[in-house]
Amino acid sequence: MTEQRVDALKKDYIIDRYRIERVLGEGGFGITYLAYHTSMGDPVAIKEYLPLEFAVREGGSTVLPRGGKAADTYAWGLKRFLDEAKTLARFRDHPNIVSVRDFFEANGTAYMVMQYEEGQTFGEWLAANPRPTQQQLLDIFIPVLDGLREVHAQQFLHRDIKPGNIYIRSDGRPLLIDFGASRLALGEHSRSLTNIITPGYSPKEQYTSTGNQGAWTDLYAIGATLWRAVSGKEPPLASDRGEARDEDRPDPLVPAVHIGRDRYAESFLRALDWAVAYLPKDRPQTVQAFQAVLLETWNRERETEVKTATPPPIQPTSTPPQPSSPAATIHPPQAQNASVGKWLVLASGVVALAGGGYWFGQTNHAGSTDNAVISSQPLPPATAKAETPATPANEAPVVTPTPPLLAPPSRLPFEPEMVDIAAGTFTMGCVAGRDDVEGGCDDDEKPAHEVSLSAYRIGKYEVTFEQWDACEQANACPHAEDEGWGRGNHPVINVSWDDITGKYLPWLNRETGQQYRLPTEAEWEHAARGGAETAYPWGNSISCDKADYNYDDCNTVGTSPVGSYAANTYGLYDTVGNVWEWVQDTKRGYSSESVRNPQGSPASSSSSAYRVLRGGSWFNTPWFVRSAYRLNLTPGARNFSIGFRLASGQ
């Protein structure tokens, strides 16, 4: 069971016809609860729309949008959330698609009610069954393809099929969940889609905004999931496969006919290889075509089975016409014209419970990624890639990017490398003409005010997984999930303010004899600006070569290794984007009075007060990664876009 979030609805709260029992999962876009129908008593999972960057809970129940541009974004996302619920309700009677029972508006937000099921993900099932038989795989994937065929029949794509998004009920029946890869960037809702990929399972066409997507896209993910089961390894990234083709090297995805020839039928393995063909035109073009080949193998296995008294495996809900050979069903993708507008994309966000059950919603700190909202609009036509804007000549120069330096002998390997910041005075907050780009100032960035700081030290880089893992290996810190984006010198993510102040810092200071801490909000902004009088450390415009953020054709998915972009003039890396960074401070308004060395919160606190994060992340658009922007979350919040850097001194 996940830790109760302080801004969650309380136990026994009645909403519509349901009584809240506890939180099942939470993340950046909402909270999911276990609840019970007040008259019938049956359990349900309820997803509440509560995007942390754009809304807050007030008075224990009401959800209110934050000020400024966030209010419009919140309303836009709320409508898409309801559109999503209506779309998913179309499939409520299908035995192999997750079921939405109800949806409604209340408390200034919206709720989606789902069937609650006991079971495990296919990924968890594979961990317990690392050498599955061909028959076991067919008994799972034939029904899954029945569900996918129905999704495609309604002119929708799933776009995020992977081991974690196929659910095996406790009675063995499989379920297709988490229609979530097409998360829309709430902060940039004028754009149609943000490309969110799952490394190894997303095909080449999902890596660009103009990729020709269709049934073949989902079938690649099905094939990659089967390849994972047959090989016991994660499939290579489609981008790596593309580079190998460009450089005339062997495909890093070894054909299944070579990997599994001692354990699986050749016809089964060739079907799998067909699905994971690199080019869309070389894959099956419909679910029926691919399913027919698997059914031929499935039926052949059935004919040779020894009859026993045990119940037969689950039969598919229907059998499509079987082609005489796979080649007879291959058709090139249709030109992307009128037909492409018919494909809509689901974005529901179903997360599997480690202890059984599933729900629509977000993630606990050990779960899968968050998802946002549904697009009720058709996919946009292909457009030319925008050129990266040039940096104006009058903007501040930046330091040439260099990789992190090795620790000097006086510093332990897991200690942060620090930068000395001299005493000084700066204007904190949003100043007209300096910070009001990309949509203007947010309400809590005002009034701008003068702040004087004594000398202090701050981390040159965000704290990395390598540094956090040293604490975990000492049994002093909880495990932090990396979402498959890499550990090592990637910034640690999925860590809360409480994790840092209650676990990591006590361990680090005990091991090093130092007094590391989180920076105050004023220290962070002063250091992040690097002395610049502009919205970003280098100027008032931003482009993909300057930071890891979400906009235009940057196409970033997940974090970048620390130090991947240029440092500011103070020598700090990644103060713009990559990950949100926790600071000491509790949520509070600004005063116009000048202040000296404003203090944040105590080094450790169990208070439920909101804490501040700065800098934005890879997931956020330019407005949110300005030096002045402030985000407030509960101290227990964990997310795939949240990390931190350290400070000392004063």
Image (cartoon, rainbow, N blue to C red):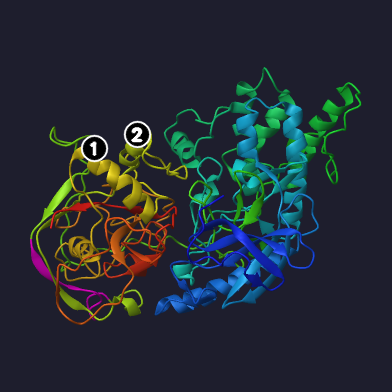
- For this rendering, which residue is in front, 351 or 504? 504
Residue at 14% in and 56% down: 570
Q: In the rendered image, which quarter is residue 155 located in?
A: bottom right
Task: Classify 10 Å Cα crowding around label 2: few (below 14), some (14-19), many (20 and above).
Answer: few
Q: Which residue is mark 1?
A: 511
Q: Which amino acid type is shown beneath numbered disc 2?
A: Ala
The tag on residue 450 is: none
Q: Main secondary structure of the magenta part?
A: loop
Q: Is residue 337 visible?
A: no
Q: Label 1 vs label 2: CA separation? A: 10 Å
Element type at marker 2? loop
Q: Answer whether labels 1 and 2 touch (C-beta < 8 Å).
A: yes
- The quadrant of the image that shows the C terminus is bottom left
Q: Is residue 112 visible?
A: yes
The magenta stretch is 423-435
Residue at 29% in and 60% down: 583
